[in-house]
Structure formats: C-alpha cells, structure tokens
Image (cartoon, grey):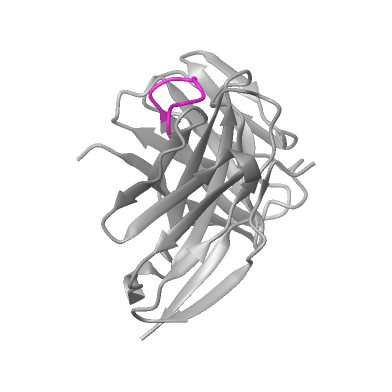
Amino acid sequence: DGGITQSPKYLFRKEGQNVTLSCEQNLNHDAMYWYRQDPGQGLRLIYYSQIVNDFQKGDIAEGYSVSREKKESFPLTVTSAQKNPTAFYLCASSAGGRSNQPQHFGDGTRLSIL
Amino acid sequence: AQKVTQAQTEISVVEKEDVTLDCVYETRDTTYYLFWYKQPPSGELVFLIRRNSFDEQNEISGRYSWNFQKSTSSFNFTITASQVVDSAVYFCALSEARTGANNLFFGTGTRLTVIP
C-alpha cells in the first residue's frame, strides 16, 4: 500500500539530547513537509522540501534540522536548541509544490521530554 | 492575521443528527484552494476534499457535503446522519496560488464528538 510511514510513534527526549524523527513515503511524491501540532492549535510548518537535496525553512524552523538525501525520506532532527519540543509531529508529502496539490499525512510522532 | 478561522472549538451531537462545521477564510489571492482534513484519534490527517476558488459548486460525497460561498468567504462542511466513527478533529485549510502548497494555512480545528 502507498503511504507515509513515521517512526517512532512515541519518543522521549532527555535534556540536551538531539532526537531524529523518521519519515518515509512510497507515493513517489516530490514534495515533503514537517509540521508541529500543539493542543488546540492548527498545524505549523517547520520545514519543507520540494526536491532532493533542497529544503526550506517554514514558520518555526528554529531548533530543528532536516535532510533530503533521498526522494522517499525526509528525517527531522529536534536539537537541544529547541527548548519546548513536546508536541505531535506530522510528516506530509504532495505530488508537487503547487498550491492545488493536497498533502497526504503520516500517523505522526508524539515527542515528550523526560 | 488568521487566514482560516474555525470558530467552533468543540461540537457534540447525538448519533444520526446532522452537523455543520464552519470555516471562514481570508485571502487577497484570486486563485486559491480550500481543503478539509479529518484527524481521528489515531492522529493522522485524512484528506477529505479540495475546492478551487473558481468552482463554487457545492459537493456531496455520501453523508458529507460542502458549501463554498465566495461572497461570505466560507467553506462549510456538513455531515448528515452523523455516526460515532465521525468523531474526530476536523481542519479547514487554505493554499494560495502565489505562495504554493508550501504555505498551507490551517485553522485551529473543530473537535466533533458523536454520542451514541
């Protein structure tokens, strides 16, 4: 089945630690996205990538980093610089970066601080 | 300024009742796209519908229907004969042609609870 796989489902971070969230898609989509969701809020864009080896900052990129070495993979690292990392993280992809392309989402990773 | 407003934070209905979820948007673009997503308790967002700014035809898909009115900048979503499986958080979102899909503006969501 085509889709987006995020792992792990739950993740715990210690103080000063970097953690990496995995996102893999087999939809052959060019564009991929990372969002952060906090309780009672909509989704906020962290980073996006329209093509391999290229990515751009979204609205809340500080304290996060990404890479896009392969079309199907877009991992997100939450660095120790992100002081409030507890949130639900959603990865998405779309066939292209045009505004009419719907984004398709993974199941999410819930990150908490130990 | 908020580009997408979902004023209803939470709604509860009894099974088989109809329910309408409101969405009001704001844009200066003449070409834009509106979306509805469903987020069940499992967490993933499920794409429901896309509407472009040039097509004001209402759409019906089974028990779901959408009413797009440019005059009031609204894109409301109605569930007819609600079922317990409809319980979820529903998000309305806006994408503008000039900024591309990279800027998908989400509302804050409406949590729908259908009581059996």
| Residue at the image point whose x is 54% and y is 67% from the top | B111
Residue furthest bottom as drawn = B116
Q: Residue at x 50, y 33 (%)?
A: A75
* Quadrant position of residue A64: top right
* Image point (63%, 56%), residue name: B6
Q: Is residue B97 magenta?
A: no
- In the image: residue A42, left or right of residue A75: right
In the rendered view, does A112 fall on the left or right side of B13? right
Count of all numbered marks drawn on residues in the image: 0
Residue at horizontal 39 percent and vertical 43 percent from the top: B49
Can you name the residue that lies furthest to the left here? A1
Residue bounds of the magenta highlight: A94-103
Residue extending farthest to the front is B71
Residue A113, percent from left and from top:
66, 60
Quarter of the image that includes the N terminus of chain B: top right
Q: Residue A65 versus residue B44: which sits nearer the camera?
A: B44
Figure check: B62 above or below A70: below
Can you give x and y, in whole percent of width and height, for residue B91 in the image?
A: 53, 53
Task: Provide the major secondary structure of the magenta segment.
Answer: loop
Q: Is residue B61 left or right of residue B19?
A: left
Looking at the picture, how far across and down is residue A11, in whole percent?
A: 53, 56
Height in image: A99 above or below A112? Answer: above
Residue A73 lies in what quarter of the image?
A: top left
Residue A108 can be seen in this image: yes
**Magenta-colored stretch includes residue A102:** yes
> Image quadrant for the C terminus of chain B?
bottom left
Residue B52, placed above or below residue B90: above
**Residue A114 can be seen in this image:** no
